Amino acid sequence: MNTLKHYTALCSCLLFTLSLSAQRSTEGGLFVGMANYQGDLAPSPVAIDQSKLALGGLYRYMMTDHIGIKGSVTWGRIAGDDRNRPGYNPRQRTWTMTNSILEMAVHGEWFVFGTSRYGNTGLHLRQYSPFLSVGIGAAFTNPKVRVPAEDRAKLPESGATSTFLVVPLTGGLRLDILDDFVVMLEFGSRITFSDYLDGVSKNGRNTTNDWYMFGGISFIYIISESVGGKGNRW
């Protein structure tokens, strides 16, 4: 028990030290990009011409120069078509799918080259850093599968669901270009742990789960900021 107390005290001291020496900020922004997916009605890896619009909002707290916590809400559309599958023959099946996705997630982010946004003189320093993140969230979907009349009895499949636990895996580049303004380029894949993102499993490739992706650009405003614990901008 004493060992646990000592460990907890050490972690608390380390976090307190980081909070005094590092940049802390809150940020809000908008995401604009494209959505796509990999599943039973899509080829491997994806059909680029099936990419659809994606929009979102985000809120980030920078704990240190390198570590951020982000909350996001993202909406996007995906589509699939049997005709995009390799070796497709017009006499084969002609199923299509559209789906809308609303994702709510929390992400832990690591900015590889993150440094203070301000120099010793207090002037803003432009910086560029790649970043990686992993998160946890939920996706709420509405798949609509269109099939010929002779295949309608095959749908909906038993066991199909429209809500998914997702793990977002994202990478990109942060461009800290102005005192109050940051641009981020990013691409992320989502693990869904399910084969029903497109509403099809038993009538498709039921040995692999479906994924979906968001890629685009975020426009971010620095809401408030403190450097070195002095509250330069708070």
Image (tube, helix red, strand yellow):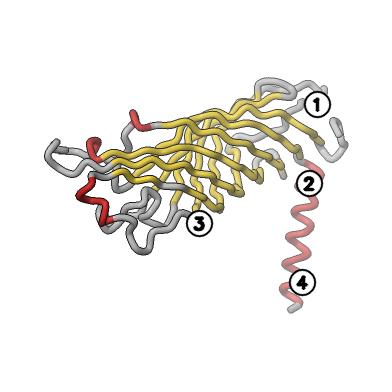
What residue sits right under mark 1 in the picture?
Answer: 120
Depicted 218 relative to depicted 8: above or below = above
Q: Which residue is mark 3?
A: 165
Q: Disc 2 on helix, strand or loop?
A: helix
Relative to residue 205, is residue 213 drawn left or right? right
Q: Amino acid at mark 2?
A: Ser
* Residue at image mark 2: 19
How many discs appear?
Answer: 4
Q: What is the CA distance from the residue labelled 3 to the residue labelled 2?
A: 32 Å
* Mark positioned earlier in the residue sequence (1 or 4): 4
Look at discs 1 and 2 and give the one toward the viewer: 2
User: Is residue 207 visible from the viewing direction of this image?
Assistant: no
Q: Work out whether 177 lies above or below 12.
A: above
Circle 2 crowding by C-alpha within 10 Å: few under 14, some 14–19, many from 20: some
Question: Secondary structure under badge 3?
Answer: strand
Residue type for callout 3: Leu
Disc 4 or 3, which lies upstream in sequence? 4
